[in-house]
Image (spheres, grey):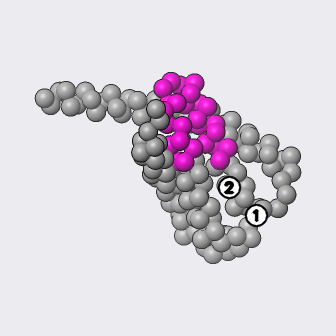
């Protein structure tokens, strides 16, 4: 029987890691703002705050997907599927952040799919592997200290 509390805990876990990932992008955006100046964003017809908000929303969207599908993260193949789906959510948020809610074109959908294929199918398994290795190291250090 599904456990709603565990599911909500997984969602919160995913959002936390999504926001941590978004934090890396916010840091890069801030560096661009510091070295590029205010005109850096004016040339692209956006603002620093809008870019940061979009990155944080993308982190939350990807985190919700990863958290909701956390139980699927049992092997590399499943991690690739979860990564792909999370990257679709991130790609949609970034597209809306860049162009607003104007009608989608085929090119928009293709960019989101290519982004998801590249990021999700590569980063998903890598993140899963790093998480698994980290768990094994923590367990080993606990058993060594006992």
**SS under mark 2:** helix
Answer whether residue 36 is visible to the viewer in this image. no
Q: Residue furthest front?
A: 1
Nearest the viewer among 68 and 97 is 68
Residue 3: which quarter of the image?
Answer: top left
Q: Name the residue under label 2.
A: 94
Query: Left or right: 82 with respect to 16?
Result: right
Left or right: 44 in relation to 33: right
Dot 2 or dot 1, earlier in sequence: 2
Where is residue 141 drawn, in percent x and y?
Answer: 22, 31
Where residue 16 sits in the image (x, y, percent)?
45, 51
Q: In this view, does 56 lie above or below 5?
A: below
Q: In which quarter of the image is the C terminus?
A: top left
Picture coordinates of residue 35 (x, y %)? 57, 68
The span shown in magenta is 63-89
When the figure is inspected, residue 20 is found, relative to residue 87, above or below; the finding is below
In this view, the residue in front, 90 or 39, is 90
Query: Label 2 neighbourhood size at 10 Å, few (<14), some (14-19), many (20+)?
Result: some
- Distance in Å between CA atoms under marks 2 and 1: 9 Å
Towards the viewer: 94 or 5:
5
Quarter assignment of residue 41: bottom right
């Amino acid at each position: 029987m599904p456990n709603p509390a565990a599911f909500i805990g997984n969602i919160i876990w995913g959002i936390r890691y999504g926001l941590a990932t978004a934090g890396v992008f916010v840091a890069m955006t801030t560096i661009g703002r510091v070295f590029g100046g205010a005109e850096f964003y004016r040339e692209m017809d956006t603002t620093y705050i809008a870019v940061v908000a979009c990155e944080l929303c993308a982190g939350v969207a990807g985190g919700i997907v990863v958290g909701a599908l956390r139980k699927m993260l049992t092997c590399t193949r499943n991690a690739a599927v979860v990564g792909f789906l999370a990257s679709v959510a991130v790609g949609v948020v970034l597209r809306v952040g860049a162009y607003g809610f104007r009608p989608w074109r085929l090119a928009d959908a293709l960019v989101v799919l290519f982004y998801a294929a590249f990021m999700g199918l590569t980063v998903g398994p890598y993140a899963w592997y790093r998480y698994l290795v980290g768990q094994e190291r923590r367990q080993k250090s606990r058993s060594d200290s006992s």
